[in-house]
Amino acid sequence: MPVGTLASVKGIPQETLEELGAQIILGNTYHLYLRPGVEIVRRMGGLHGFMSWPRAILTDSGGFQVFSLNELRKITEDGVTFRSHLDGSSHFFSPENSMAAQIGLGADIIMAFDECTEHPATRERVRESMELTVRWAERSKKYFEEHKHEVPWNSLPASPLPTLAAQNAARMGHPPSGDSTQALFGIVQGGMDRELRRESALRTIELGFPGYAIGGLSVGEPRELTREIVGSTLGHLPADKPRYLMGVGTPEEIAEYANLGVDMMDCVLPTRAARHGLLFTSEGKISIKQARYAQDPAPLDPNCPCRVCQRYSRAYLRHLYASNEVLAQVLNTVHNLSFYLDTMRRVRHAISLGEESTLSVVWSRPKP
Amino acid sequence: MPVGTLASVKGIPQETLEELGAQIILGNTYHLYLRPGVEIVRRMGGLHGFMSWPRAILTDSGGFQVFSLNELRKITEDGVTFRSHLDGSSHFFSPENSMAAQIGLGADIIMAFDECTEHPATRERVRESMELTVRWAERSKKYFEEHKHEVPWNSLPASPLPTLAAQNAARMGHPPSGDSTQALFGIVQGGMDRELRRESALRTIELGFPGYAIGGLSVGEPRELTREIVGSTLGHLPADKPRYLMGVGTPEEIAEYANLGVDMMDCVLPTRAARHGLLFTSEGKISIKQARYAQDPAPLDPNCPCRVCQRYSRAYLRHLYASNEVLAQVLNTVHNLSFYLDTMRRVRHAISLGEESTLSVVWSRPKP
């Protein structure tokens, strides 16, 4: 899932995302809550109508952002008090607030409000944090069940939305008078402790969600440990429901985690790296700012079918980056997203080959 | 002509410019000379190959940029010594240097090296400056005639260019072994003095160029004076050759100047204004940053067929701008360029109606 923090995958028009084959994008509740605010998005028909994106959207709970962005935060049983990174104003997120915000934003998949445990942490601290996340998951689900019909598109008949929003509501397949709701996913925490991860998984499954995420990884631990925790945690999650590993990773990693059984991932890496001139290619990583590319007439990646590799040379991309041209960010992001989405297409293809022809050599997927 | 200073119309991929119907864009010799440098562009097949733009390109002479960007410049009969705005390094532009640079950049239309007279200026100063421009035009033409076959595409057979550049050379219709050259336009100066403008025009025409530009306007003088000088100068320029008014203007102005007989114009206004959230619409100018648009579900311009107006709301564009999202610049620029190019299409349509049906009421064009 490409990350579109503020209802925009930075620099990329939605029609280009469609052309790239993005089926789902991620929005950040914390950022959207601050700008433009949930009510404005709701009145524009939710994120789909607001940003004119008819395909799927997932919003995070805001929890991770609050923990990672704010020095001045206070966590209680009730929720988290934090200060806006924009103007220092004080705000409060709780499971109920987060659900209300995410229902108002109207994404297709929304996330339970969790605490992302810091790393490293003592076992006692990890247990306390994991148990808080379980209690918050229960409160998230309770609020969601009581308010899930308050999605933006269900208010369409009462106050008919103007052209663009109505068109988008129609395009995204939500009948204005229908009773479709969102899918609320639970999140497994438990730090780097396999036993606590297992307990978190079992207790979250007991609450019952249509999909499960693995949170609290990629927080500074060694990659080998990430792999181990992902592998063991996946074994406790139902195979017939989506399993979402949050916040990863490199192209190699997403292929590897998919191989372990992960169905969904999100990461800022392809878009953020693009803005820093770091490009992923079938021949390895390229730092386009290097002088060695100044006169290189070759495409970025000779094996890439994206519009950037079909049209522009490394020399041109290097010039754009070195000259601080905005087009550098645009073209670099198009390529990196294309490379990531193409990687996942190849992963899916390999899985389908494995399932159809039982070629477990090509692709083996553990059955949990 | 959209302005693509550094071989990029800021934020807009070339395929989008094609989609918008841009037939010709402008590059700035001063900027390209500094970054990435003429030799790199030449080796990549000229600007066409370098930026992968098969349609027409015009480069300015660098004179205007040197005059307007640099405090530390020294003008002599020979040329202009100036300092780079990037690193303060010292450089020298003369008619010969400017021609060499523009031949190396390989645009389709290149401009004689002129002095853009400051405003206001005494009649004596304007005359001296105008006469210097005439002498520089003669030197520009002399150098061009002696070196015009040194265009990048003529060196293709000697050192065969790699795929992308060769493809672009082919797409732009320059046979690698052909003897096609560029078109060098002369520039009329003469400040705000109708008599000196007339003399400048006659002496430049006497030198003989395939097209003529009117320079030195839009330098701070009242709009009424611009119109008067444009109108009187056009009367001295041959109607069967392109007449190019440099550095204008608003949508109203470009329609008005076209009505006076101007064939070509360039201006940073549509792209620069877009970056500042100032948008041109059929219903007037819109400053999208205003809070009044925060919940406005309407398209930017209900009468505009561009992809931005067909898909996004004012509320979304306002959010992108207020949040400093790069997509704001991209979408705003697409719309403003679309509006400008559409204005010129309507101007051409009106001209063709007038010519075919002699409806001089619809469109009257003075015959010089």
Image: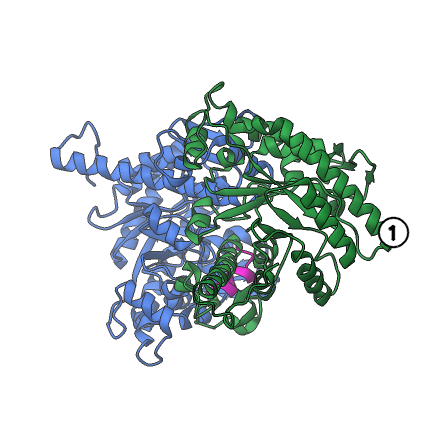
Chain colours: A green, B blue
Point 51% across, 73% down: residue:
A361
Residue placed most toward the observer, B19 or A335:
A335
Total label count? Answer: 1
Task: Check disc 1 and report the residue beneath it.
Answer: A124
Q: Which of the 4 image quadrants contains residue A322? A: bottom right
Point 44% across, 53% down: residue:
A20
Residue placed most toward the observer, A131 or B298:
A131
Q: For the view shown, which residue lies furthest in the bottom direction?
A: B158
Image position, residue B314 (x, y; %): 48, 31
- Magenta region: A316-325
Residue placed most toward the observer, A61 or A72:
A61
Most frequent secondary structure within the magenta stretch: helix
* Subunit ID for the residue under disc 1: A
Image position, residue A72 (x, y; %): 82, 41
Asked if residue A61 lies left or right of residue B336, the reply is: right
Asked if residue A85 lies left or right of residue B182, the reply is: right
User: In which quadrant will I find the C terminus of chain B?
Assistant: top left
Point 52% across, 50% down: residue:
B68
Q: Classify B222 as above or below B86.
A: above
Q: Classify A271 as above or below A41.
A: below
Q: Which of the 4 image quadrants contains residue B193? A: top left
Q: Amino acid at mark 1?
A: Glu
